[in-house]
Image (tube, grey):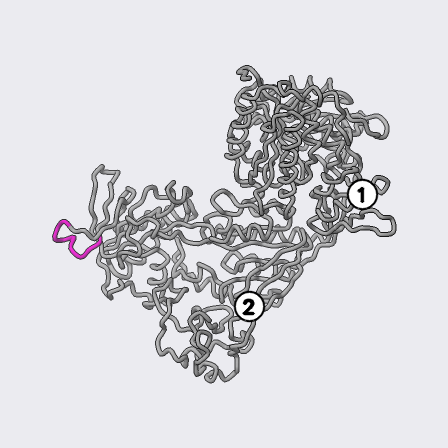
Amino acid sequence: MKSVKHNGEIRIGVYICHCGTNIAGKVKIEEVVKYAQNLPNVIVARDYKYMCSDPGQDLIKKDIKELKLNRIVVASCSPHLHEHTFRKAAEEAGLNPFYFQMANIREHVSWVTKDSKEATEKAKAMVKAAVYRVVFHEALEKKKEKINPDVLIIGGGIAGITAALTIADAGKKVYLVEREPSIGGHMAKFDKTFPTLDCASCILTPKMTAVKDHPNITLLTYSEVENVDGYVGNFKVKIRKKPRYVDIEKCVGCYECIKNCVYKEGKFPNEFDEGLSKRKPIYIPFPQAVPLAAIIDPATCIQFLSGKCKKACQEACERGAIDFNMREEIIEVEVGAIIVATGFKIFDPSQIPQYGYGRYPNVYTSLEVERLVNSSGPTGGEIILRDGRTPKSVGIVHCVGSRDKNYNIWCSRVCCMYSLKLAHLIKERTGAEVYNFYIDMRTPGKGYEEFYLKLMEEGVHFIRGKVAEVTDWAITPEEEGKLIIRVEDTLIGVVRRIPVDMVILSVGLTPQPDADEVRRLLNISCSKEGWFLERHPKLAPVSTFTDGVFIAGACQGPKDIPDTVAQAEAAAAEALALIDKSEITLEPNTAFIDEEKCSGCHVCIALCPYSAISFNEEKKIAHINEALCKGCGVCVAACPSKAAQQRLFLDEQIYAEIEGALV
Amino acid sequence: MKNNNFEPKLLGIFCNWCTYLAADLAGVSRMDYPANLRIVRTMCSGRIDPQFILWAFRNGADGVLIGGCHPGDCHYIEGNYKTLRRYKLLKRVLKEMGINDKRLRLEWISASEGEKLQRVVKEFVEEIKNLGPISNDEAFKKLLTSTKGG
């Protein structure tokens, strides 16, 4: 083993966890204990059912005191889960917490090895690596930093709104950034919510207004986060405010500009109505928009396209709110925590050509139908087809793009329930025959199953089977002029053709197309599918692996409104727990320069991604600013004279660990 | 020199943010892979001193797998690019030393790619099994007797 100096006698305690049967079911614990006992410097080796439990920790604490242990090794799960627990236990027993090393024999051994003998051998090697390494550990001081108490929330849907209000009500300052011209997200587009059939905007609009009026919330709509710098407690964020060409401070949402626009009628697809209505180049996204202010779309406005508009809108605005010369603005804010609530996109069903979306005008997505049934929607809530007819029969196709390995493998969780809701609303308002085509009904929420039973009583038809095709190819006279849904009814085992006037595709939920950019911006992870990854699926569902960054709502995975709100409040609570500490302890894994060894070659200086290393002209050596150093160790690996070192990852420690793992 | 009974010793040096988490995910998802790989963690793959790898070979590793974040995804902005540079240089050095450079492998494995980790380990174990023990390589003895430097 590489020799370096360490003070006094090394007394190591090794603790091997059974993790119930998670480890003990595969690894022969007794053998590992016996093996550990005979490793150099090991004073005691013990095992316990659950090392992370109180009795387990007490075992360690007692040994530290009674056996005068000065190094601790725990062989259990991933350090990402319990390193903190055991460091704290060591500290409570009076030992510096960094005289501790963890061997991961669960995630990296028992759970991934088939053979018990091989697993036991591998566990021994991992324990040995930790025992060899911990010899070279040293007492370290935890760095403390002040936490900025302000919070940034990205995304102004129901998740972002809820989180913003919770934090603002707790007396903290919130920046809420939304890229669309109004907050509200998808929920603002819905008519009713399942299963209570509450009016969505009646419960959402007061919250949207509360956001606007809250003294602790700075609302930045039509804005995007451009850059995030810094770290937990001290993020520096650049936000790009896109020009909306209307001063929201002056605009009162009186619609005069819109009425006077040179376009007499709307000409361009209205995004909020899913393209089912038309808007003008100057518009207000929807009547309950917050902020209630007009916006000009430069891609369709004559003034921006040709510069030759008579600008009737500007003339009509008594308050002089319209400003064609408005420029993009970059603002900088400093926050201590960030909540990501960027939501989802709906699955684009034109990817499944056999369902006819985009080909047959009477095939709709569920979100389009949400707008159709909405009393503030393009038809005032009347359910009519594009040709003005009221449908007499409607087919709702479940699981479009969901639970299908050709598209998205996951269940989108909300489609069953919103399909039932739409079925109810359509039946109620048109009296049409409604057919639901489902693979499985999934209604696992409070009152959801009851809602399903109610729909069955209402006479909605349920046909179990995945729809094969939607076609207009009639083979009987009664199918003429209709859309025919071809499906195998798997309950009675026959292939059926159901002619309907209207087809609704219950599309699934997909990650935002730019989730990857957001992920990079914030240094968080995405699952394979593109949903943001939580720190732990059960125990840390709103935290990420980047400290100080939390996730809420459907950006983490498909969710309905109650779950989204609950998670948003959880994320807010986590953020509050963080910023309320006012001080944060940082890992001491920063790099430093041994002045004696530094030859002043400059190699490290150019490599540092954080410009934390400078050259001390007087001493002719490098100097690391530890406040800027993030502890990657790139400079350490490059230093030709080994003058640069990294705490917690010293050369000796890594050499010893490698040796232990292999020999 | 193929030897079917030969069980290679492999060392994995994984970055804390991507590949180590991928290995954790493989565990949580119970994706089994050969027990030959022993994992050491660094905060960034950019911390990996090429001498760690030589030290591993010196201590009997038949292969070393470096795991880092995909290009553009480094938690420390660009540490993995430095890893790539060092990796390529070290491959050349290994060849010159008479060690088969296939014994060193670099893979970008993100936190969500438990499956990729499983596949890579399986592949790598097979590949090193085909190469045989590192003592087959002509320069190994020379390496054994040399100091590890540093």
Q: Report the residue marked by disc 1.
A: A593
Please, what is the three-letter code of the amino acid marked with disc 2?
A: Lys
Q: Report the residue marked by disc 2.
A: A212
Magenta range is A475-483
Using the numbered discs, state the Cα–Cα distance from disc 2 to disc 1 in whole angstroms: 51 Å
Q: Is residue A241 magenta?
A: no
Closer to the camera in the image, B64 or A549: B64
**Same chain for the residues at labels 2 and 1, yes or no?**
yes
The image shows a total of numbered marks equal to: 2
Closer to the camera in the image, B125 or A329: B125
| Residue A212 in the figure: left or right of residue A255 | right
The spot of residue A147 in percent (x, y) is: 71, 54
Q: Where A410 falls versus A74 (above or below)?
A: below
Q: Nearer the viewer, mark 2 or mark 1?
A: 1
The disc numbered 1 marks a residue on which chain? A
In this view, the residue farthest toward the front is: B96
Q: Where A168 falls versus B66 (above or below)?
A: below
Q: Neighbour class for label 1 at 10 Å: few (<14), some, many (≥20)?
A: many
Closer to the camera in the image, A361 or A572: A361
Q: Secondary structure at mark 2?
A: helix
The spot of residue A620 in percent (x, y) is: 85, 48
Q: Where A91 falls versus A273 (above or below)?
A: above
Please, what is the three-letter code of the amino acid marked with disc 1?
A: Ile
Q: Residue at x 28, y 48 (%)?
A: A354
The spot of residue A616 in percent (x, y) is: 83, 51
Marks 2/1 in contact by CB < 8 Å: the verdict is no
**Residue A50 seen:** no
**Residue A295 seen:** yes
Locate the N terminus of chain A by quadrant.
top right
The spot of residue A212 in percent (x, y) is: 55, 68
| Residue A399 in the figure: left or right of residue A50 | left
